[in-house]
Image (cartoon, rainbow, N blue to C red):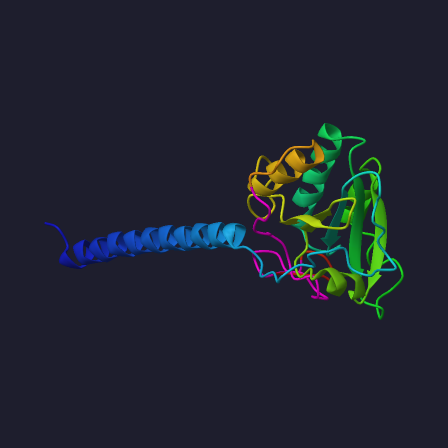
């Protein structure tokens, strides 16, 4: 004869197992939704300088369009933006003056900006790297997010402002990359602006989607 106590225990064990599975599925779903929202949420930007600003750090080219990208050296998603710059150089070589500006707090160690992103930028042919102490240069251009790009014509007029990735940390075709490629190849771009996916340039620290430091002493959006 079946012991009623054992039957009850088995019943509750089945319900406990089912509850555990439901909780796990819910947790995974929430994590996926958060990850997707993080990757596809653009950074806040502001009106950019419509004409090349007075600057002592970057230089306007009189021969080719000048592309300036601002980067937080400890923003993990900016490596995708730098990879897109490398793609642009490969496909538009000799038709752009490229300058990559790295934010660095004046109170930080001298090598604070010399991260993996710096090394990646250094490998891009023809790119000039700059250190922007306390973000003075980014303020002149009106840059707020890591990976934010500005393209100016030889006369100093703004041709494009925005990001060149389709989402945080993702490489591949995007509105911004296509627009910049068109400009550098002498064509009219389909868009003159695009969303920027990157960390706050003024953050001393950068955080990964999981909420932990991406690197020691670094940053999140």
Residue 67 appearing in the image:
yes
Residue 76, percent across and down? 67, 51
Is 120 in the magenta? Answer: no
Q: Quadrant of residue 184?
A: top right
Chief SS of the magenta region: loop
* Magenta residues (range): 191-213
The residue shown at (25%, 55%) is 15
User: Which residue occupies the foreground of this view, 56 or 127?
Assistant: 56
Q: Nearer the viewer, residue 212 or 124?
A: 124
* Residue placed furthest toward the left: 1
Q: Residue furthest bottom?
A: 107
Instruction: Residue 104: tell me if it is visible.
Output: no
Residue 106 percent across, percent down from the top left = 85, 68
Q: Position of residue 29 (x, y in %)?
A: 39, 51
The image shows residue 168, relative to residue 90, as above or below, that is: below
- Which image quarter: residue 72? bottom right
Q: How far across and down, in percent of the image, does residue 132 sit? A: 82, 60
């Amino acid at each position: 004869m079946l012991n009623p106590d054992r039957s009850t225990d088995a019943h509750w064990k089945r319900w406990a197992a089912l509850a555990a599975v439901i909780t796990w599925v819910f947790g995974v779903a929430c994590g996926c939704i958060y990850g997707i929202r993080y990757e596809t949420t653009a950074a806040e930007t502001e009106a950019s300088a419509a004409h090349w600003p007075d600057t002592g750090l970057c230089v306007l080219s009189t021969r080719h369009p000048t592309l300036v990208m601002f980067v937080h050296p400890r923003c993990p998603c900016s490596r995708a933006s730098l990879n897109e710059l490398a793609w642009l150089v490969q496909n538009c070589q000799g038709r752009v003056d490229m300058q990559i500006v790295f934010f660095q707090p004046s109170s930080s160690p001298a090598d604070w900006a010399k991260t993996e992103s710096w090394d990646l930028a250094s490998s891009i042919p023809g790119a000039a790297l700059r250190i922007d102490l306390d973000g003075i240069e980014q303020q002149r251009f009106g840059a707020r997010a890591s990976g934010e790009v500005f393209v100016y014509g030889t006369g100093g007029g703004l041709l494009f402002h925005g990001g060149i990735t389709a989402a945080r940390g993702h490489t591949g075709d995007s509105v911004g990359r296509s627009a910049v490629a068109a400009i550098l190849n002498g064509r009219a771009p389909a868009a003159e602006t695009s969303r920027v996916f990157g960390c706050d340039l003024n953050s001393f620290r950068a955080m990964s989607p999981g909420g932990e430091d991406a690197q020691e002493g670094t940053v999140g959006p």
